[in-house]
Image (spheres, rainbow, N blue to C red):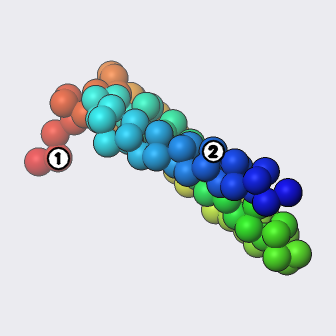
Amino acid sequence: MLMMIMNMLIFIFIMFMLGNMIFVSKHKHLLIVLMSLEFIVLSIFFLLLLYLSMIYFNLYMLMVFLVFSVCEGALGLSILVSMIRTHGNDYFQSFNLI
């Protein structure tokens, strides 16, 4: 049982690190950045699920976390749609902050 939990923790850590590496390295398109953020949120969700099930805690906190992550995803998609409508693409290079 302990070996299975350790394997799951290693898998979740690898997911988290891969999401962070994609977030840092792929900064050309907004869509890739948003998908890497969702991948990071998914790995954190798995970590919370594992932790809360290990301590036999109520899983209500997972529902709150999912609500916030869905709101974050909807906000990111609305920014993406707004950027595509105003600039025609999702390149960060064509987006001028000045």
Q: How many marks?
A: 2
User: Could you tell whether 37 is left or right of 85 in the image?
Assistant: right
- The residue shown at (42%, 46%) is 20
Q: Quadrant of residue 54?
A: bottom right
Measured as percent of width and height from the top left, residue 7 is found at 69, 48
Q: Foreground residue, 17 or 91? A: 17
Q: Quadrant of residue 92?
A: top left
Instruction: Using the image, determine if residue 1 lies above or below residue 23.
Output: below
Query: How far apart, in angstroms, are the residues tagged by discs 2 and 1?
Result: 38 Å
> Can see residue 60?
no
Q: Which residue is under mark 2?
A: 11
Q: Quick one: label 2 or label 1, which is nearer the N terminus? A: 2
Q: Which residue is under mark 1?
A: 97
> Can see residue 95?
yes
Instruction: Using the image, determine if residue 73 lies above or below residue 28.
Output: below
Q: Name the amino acid type tagged 1.
A: Leu
Instruction: Using the image, determine if residue 72 lies above or below residue 24.
Output: below
